[in-house]
Image (cartoon, helix red, strand yellow):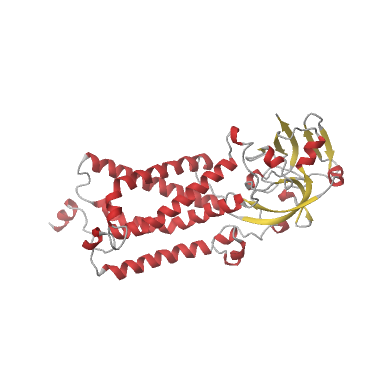
Amino acid sequence: MEGMRSRLFPPAFKGRLHDARTATSIGRWLGLAFVVCFVTGLISHVLQHPPGWAVGALPSRPVWGYRLTQGLHVASGVAAVPLLLAKLWTVYPRLFAWPPVRSVRHALERLSVAVLVAAAVLEVVTGLLNTAQWYPWPFSFVPVHFAVAWLVAGSILLHLAVKAPAIRAHWSRRSPGTLALPEEDGPDRRSLLAAVAAAVGAVTVTTVGQSFTPLKGLVLLAPRHPDHGPNGLPVNRTATEAGVGPIAADRYRLTVAGPRSRTLTLDELRGLPQYEAELPIACVEGWSKTAHWTGVRVRDLLDLAGAPTDARVRVVSLQTRGGYRVSEMGHEYARDPLTLLALRLNGEELTPDHGYPVRLIAPNRPGVLQTKWVGRLEVLA
């Protein structure tokens, strides 16, 4: 008889803190993390995949712009992991509310929550795996991640609209709606919130050093250390992975295609005026580091080819595999005096994995667009 009763009736949750007050408190932090992640993600996407009309309008300054926004994007996404888990823990008993559907409005509300939870979990999990460059799924990460971000944003707005009365009632300690909550839950609630804050702090401090280098000594959970790699800099894609074999210095040629096209040998590039720049390289996976680059200014090469000052430039790599073999720069980037075709990194000749013999380095530009193994510059009208 008791077994039959348990099958007919939903489970009774008697644990404390599965209440609206706790859910609202954690929801505020989670909402802030999602807002920062969404806004910085939009910036990253526009810089990484600019619409055609925006290519010439994107700014090359500040030089650390992309490093800051992408670092915040990954840090806020990592912080969202314990916050999302805590939020789901506070509300999961409502999944077993009885009856499961009380009205059309209630059914739509539950459907919206299901979409929000599924989209949020998918967005956080795929983003986290992307930082480790692990893609155990059949779809392309970037377009799906970008589309799901909009789905999460829309679902959050819908959820806030539906839950506005409850959120308003439990937003602060002085809210009238909080008077009905048991006073004895106060210390436990504060302990829970302190534990969640500690978890957020722990995962942030042990990962953010991959971009905020003063904390690089505490990098324990991040998949990259900013000091580990050839020339003292990490590498995402090696020459082997890109299909670039050994390049003999005497056989290398750089073509600058424009009104007065030029073909330059490596010795001729070395013979041109050399400039130095302290620029960060910042990758979409979240790591970044400032390095010392030496090479030829792109603007000088464009002048040799007779390029107009407002021309865009297409940069073509010698790589044969993988994405981002070709990238484009607007005139803001191409004419910036800090934009170089680098020949040396941190005082040493480039290694093959860092793009030997020539790679692009430009300010405020995603790492995937800092093209390695450059073989051709094309002046675009």
The N terminus appears in which quarter of the rendering? bottom left
Q: Quadrant of residue 105?
A: top left
Where's residue 241, x and y in %? 66, 45
Residue at the image position 74 percent from the left and 49 percent from the top: 352
Instruction: For residue 113, say whether it is visible.
Output: no
The C terminus appears in which quarter of the rendering? top right
Where's residue 184, x and y in %? 25, 70
- Could you tell whether 330 is left or right of 152 in the image? right
Residue at the image position 34 percent from the left and 68 percent from the top: 190
Compared with 69, 312 (above or below) is: above
Number of numbered markers? 0
Where's residue 40, x and y in %? 52, 48
Compared with 358, 291 (above or below) is: below
Where's residue 43, x and y in %? 54, 45
Instruction: For residue 162, say whether it is visible.
Output: yes
Q: Quadrant of residue 291?
A: bottom right
- Could you tell whether 293 is left or right of 194 in the image? right
Residue at the image position 71 percent from the left and 38 percent from the top: 315
- Could you tell whether 171 is left or right of 34 in the image? left
Residue at the image position 41 percent from the left and 55 percent from the top: 30
Looking at the picture, tell me which residue is in the foreground, 356 or 50.
50
